[in-house]
Image: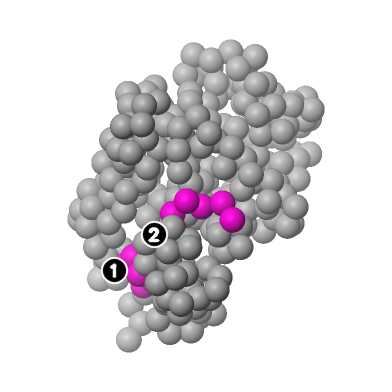
Amino acid sequence: MTEQDRTTPILTIEELEHTYGRVTVLDDVSLDVDPGDVTAIIGPNGSGKTTLIRAIVGLHEPSGGTVRYCGPDATRPIGYLQQRPAFRPGQTVREALTFYAALVGETEADAVARLERVGLGAAADRNVEALSGGMTRLVGIAQATVGDPPLIVLDEPASGLDPGMSVRIFEVAEELTASGTAVLLSSHDLSLVERTADRVALLDDGSVARLGAPADVRAELGADSLLGAFESAITGDAGTVRVRGET
């Protein structure tokens, strides 16, 4: 990948809006995702993170605005890990990933190589039902890399995991960017986001409240941590779940 390729956004979101009936969930969201970067979407519960991700991967048709993939031609432009990945019961990890690999013309050997890349080569012959939550997420990330998509989107990849596995998930996300792959993820683990992300988009009430490198966001708000910046930037009580349509 050339330097010019690395400075051209791989995904451009412009003035995105999404409503459910009379309830506005996303309001004028604009964001670029650059190749070779980890971009993190953070925000309180109910701020629109998952709705934004689902619009990016094509699971929601936005009410307004645009989501444009600007990356290179690829068999699979965007790889996606949903919050709770699931695989067909009775299959081994190898069989599950080989199924997805075959859809894009890859082999069983390719599937195993992807498992090894996320540290699960030794678990290839384990049944998917026998995996821990963290291992299931790692298989999901391996599945998201099938076909070498230039953009990988991870929705809350470390949610509900123990600290050690959460660290491993973020390490894998960072490792994926070494070849120029862009990673876009959402997370509530602000310490790991601060350590890993090149750029953060802080959503509040469906809009982008702050956007930039973690250090720049901290400096702008006079905070000594991303958590402090988060608490300063959002409106209302950071511990309150946002319910759209409330007066």
Q: x%, y% of residue 216?
A: 42, 64
Which quarter of the image is occupied by the N terminus?
Answer: top left
What is the distance, in whole Å, between disc 1 and disc 2 at their CAs? 24 Å
Q: x%, y% of residue 217?
A: 43, 66
Which quarter of the image is occupied by the C terminus?
Answer: bottom left
- Whether 180 is among the magenta residues is no
Q: Which residue is mark 2?
A: 212
Rendered image quadrant of residue 117: top right
Q: Which residue is mark 1?
A: 24
Residue found at x 43% / y 84%: 236
Q: x%, y% of residue 128?
A: 72, 35
153 or 172, nearer to the observer:
172
For label 2, the SS is: strand
What secondary structure is the magenta-colored segment mainly? strand
Residue found at x 71% / y 41%: 135
Residue found at x 53% / y 42%: 81
Residue type at numbered disc 1: Thr
- Is 82 located above or below residue 125 in the figure? below
Residue found at x 53% / y 68%: 226
Q: x%, y% of residue 106?
A: 53, 15
Q: Is residue 91 visible?
A: no
Residue type at numbered disc 2: Gly
Q: What's drawn in magenta, residue-wise? A: 195-209
> Which class describes the residues within 10 Å of circle 2: few (<14), some (14-19), or many (20+)?
some
> Which class describes the residues within 10 Å of circle 1: few (<14), some (14-19), or many (20+)?
some
Q: Which mark is residue 246?
A: none
Q: Earlier in the sequence, mark 1 or mark 2?
A: 1
Visual colour scheme: one colour
Labels 1 & 2 near each other (Cβ < 8 A): no
29 or 127, nearer to the observer:
29
State which mark lies toward you, 1 or 2: 2
- Whether 198 is among the magenta residues is yes
